[in-house]
Amino acid sequence: MPDIYDEEVKRLTDCPRDISHAWNAATPLFAFVGILDGKHFGCLTEIKARPDCFKTNNPLINQIINDDRIPTNVKEIKVEHLPLFAEYQRIIDKKIRSKI
């Protein structure tokens, strides 16, 4: 059964010119990770682009920092990246957001 992330991947795949707007609006694929250990974590792209700002002992955040598939700039996000963003958002939902 499709979830909100599948729906967003489909929507943006059908209309890739909306990716930048979706990122700026922090739609589901580009939602902020949340607060961990009192520190605010932005979206995947922000974490990847500024690893020194987001260093932590959290294994998931470190995985994001070290994942070379994640673009560091919204202009680099392509349709082929969208399933990766969906995958991470599902993991974040289970490992981080469910504990907030």
Image (cartoon, rainbow, N blue to C red):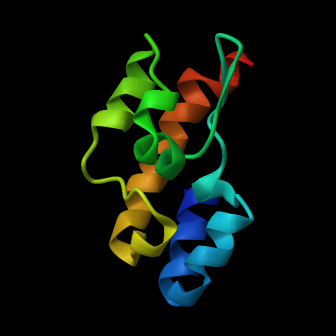
Q: Quadrant of residue 57?
A: top left
Q: Give the side of residue 44 with respect to residue 23, left or right.
A: left
Q: Position of residue 82 (x, y in %)?
A: 44, 65
- Up/down of 68 relative to 65, above or below: below
- Tell me the residue at 57%/58% (across/down): 5
- Residue 54 location in percent, x, y? 50, 28
Instruction: Residue 11: give x, y in percent of width and height.
Output: 59, 79
Residue lying at 35% horizontally and 53% vertically, measured from the top left:
70
Furthest residue in direction front, as rendered: 52
Decide if residue 3 is in sight here: no
Residue 92, relative to residue 44: is it above or below? Answer: above
Q: How far from the left and from the top, in percent, is residue 85?
A: 46, 54
Say which of 86 and 57 sits in front.
57
Q: Is residue 94 above or below residue 84?
A: above
Q: Is residue 5 visible?
A: yes
Residue 15 relative to residue 40: left or right: left
Residue at image x 43%, y 29%? 52
Instruction: Report the residue at 64% width, 10% height from top.
Output: 37
The picture quadrant where one finds residue 65 is top left
Q: Is residue 44 left or right of residue 8?
A: left
